[in-house]
Image: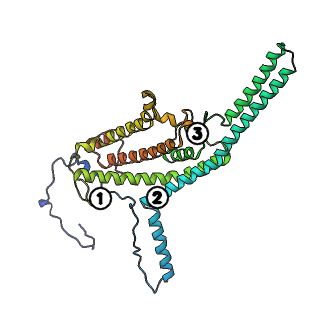
């Protein structure tokens, strides 16, 4: 056979040993993945600019600009930098919703109260002009009731009464709405009614959701690696290979999710003196139909933090399951045709 240099060489097949049934041999799941720790964004940015500088080819100004751009990029795309950006973006979006939807909600409620007052005055005035117990009274009252019903239905279609006796679009309520958009867990959340508010929601989601997912996925990877290092008692540059995971690490995903949900039941249910059934369904209290408008502002902010930590925990669990997949899981995936290496 020919080698890379074009020369002819010989291969002695008499000294080659073939392993029996090698084709059907199974490989352990630990060797199906890369032996390196998965790449992730740095927790903190690097504080050095290791760019090469050639005075004959580049000027000092160009190299300085390149170094500055690299440093800014490192600061932005590290986990702490993304945390600051996402946090600031959530506060900015909440302020934008507060300025667009808050005045509309207040003005609509004031307009509805004023209209109802005017209808009451008109009805009382016309009733005074008619004889007492006249047959025209039922007809007149019915006409005003129909007018009031039409007015109320039109106002409800425009968002009136969505908050019940309270206001939804306060600043704490807008923070909760912004976090529900970023985490995509906003089931039953209120909807912006103004065109400007809806446009802001689209822009806020288009920029915030990818950044938020990038952040929580990297935090999840970091947490999964640290848990594995704690479980296997290894250094920060190694990953477990071949050794079975400890029992507590196997049960960690289920236990962590169950514990976190029960913590929410206690914090947002029993401590608010809700009944047992309502306590276990505490997420419904933070929907538009469930009465989020009458929930105090500080509880709304606490629930927004709870949602954020819930998504982060979910990312950690997914990363942990992906990193510590056992041979049985791989076999099931291959049997069902869910996995491929091509």
How dense is the environment of label 1, judged by Cα within 10 Å: few (below 14), some, or many (20 and up)?
few
The secondary element bearing badge 1 is classed as loop
Separation (CA) of disc 2 from disc 3: 27 Å
| Residue 222 quadrant | bottom left
Residue highlighted by disc 3: 190
Q: Earlier in the sequence, mark 2 or mark 1?
A: 1
Q: Earlier in the sequence, mark 1 or mark 3?
A: 1
The nearer-to-camera label among 2 and 1 is 2
| Residue 155 quadrant | top right
The secondary element bearing badge 3 is classed as loop
Separation (CA) of disc 2 from disc 1: 25 Å
- Looking at the picture, tell me which residue is in the foreground, 128 or 245: 128
Res 82 label: 2
Does residue 106 appear to the left or right of 339 in the view shown? Answer: right
Q: Residue 157 in the image: state x and y as whole percent.
A: 67, 34
Q: Are marks 1 and 3 in contact (CB under 8 Å)?
A: no
Residue highlighted by disc 1: 36
């Amino acid at each position: 056979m020919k080698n890379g240099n074009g020369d002819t060489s010989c291969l002695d097949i008499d000294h080659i040993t073939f392993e029996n049934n090698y084709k059907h041999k199974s490989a352990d799941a630990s060797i199906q993945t890369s032996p390196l720790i998965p790449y992730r964004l740095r927790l903190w940015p690097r504080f050095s600019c290791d760019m090469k500088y050639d005075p004959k080819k580049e000027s000092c100004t160009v190299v300085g600009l390149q170094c500055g751009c690299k440093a800014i990029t490192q600061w932005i795309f590290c986990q702490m930098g993304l945390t600051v950006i996402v946090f600031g973006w959530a506060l900015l979006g909440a302020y934008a919703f507060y300025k667009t939807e808050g005045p509309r909600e207040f003005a609509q409620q004031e307009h509805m109260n004023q209209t109802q007052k005017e209808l009451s005055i008109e009805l009382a005035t016309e009733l005074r002009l008619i004889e007492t117990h006249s047959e025209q009274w039922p007809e007149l009252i019915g006409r005003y009731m129909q007018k009031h019903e039409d007015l109320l239905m039109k106002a409800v279609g425009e968002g009136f009464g969505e908050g019940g006796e309270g206001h939804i679009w306060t600043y704490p309520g807008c923070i909760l709405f912004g976090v529900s958009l970023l985490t995509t867990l906003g089931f039953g959340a209120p909807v912006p009614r103004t065109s400007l508010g809806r446009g802001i929601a689209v822009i806020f989601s288009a920029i915030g959701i990818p950044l938020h997912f990038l952040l929580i996925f990297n935090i999840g990877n970091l947490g999964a690696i640290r848990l594995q290092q704690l479980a296997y008692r290894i250094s920060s540059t190694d990953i477990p290979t071949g050794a079975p995971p400890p029992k507590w690490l196997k049960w960690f995903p289920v236990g962590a999710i169950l514990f976190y949900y029960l913590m929410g039941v206690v914090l947002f249910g029993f401590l608010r003196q809700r009944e047992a059934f309502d306590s276990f369904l505490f997420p419904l209290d933070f929907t538009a139909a469930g009465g989020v408008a009458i929930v105090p502002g500080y509880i709304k902010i606490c629930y927004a933090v709870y949602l954020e930590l819930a998504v982060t925990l979910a990312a950690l669990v997914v990363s942990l399951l992906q990193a510590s997949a056992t041979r049985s899981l791989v076999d099931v995936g291959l049997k069902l045709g869910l996995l491929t290496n091509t």
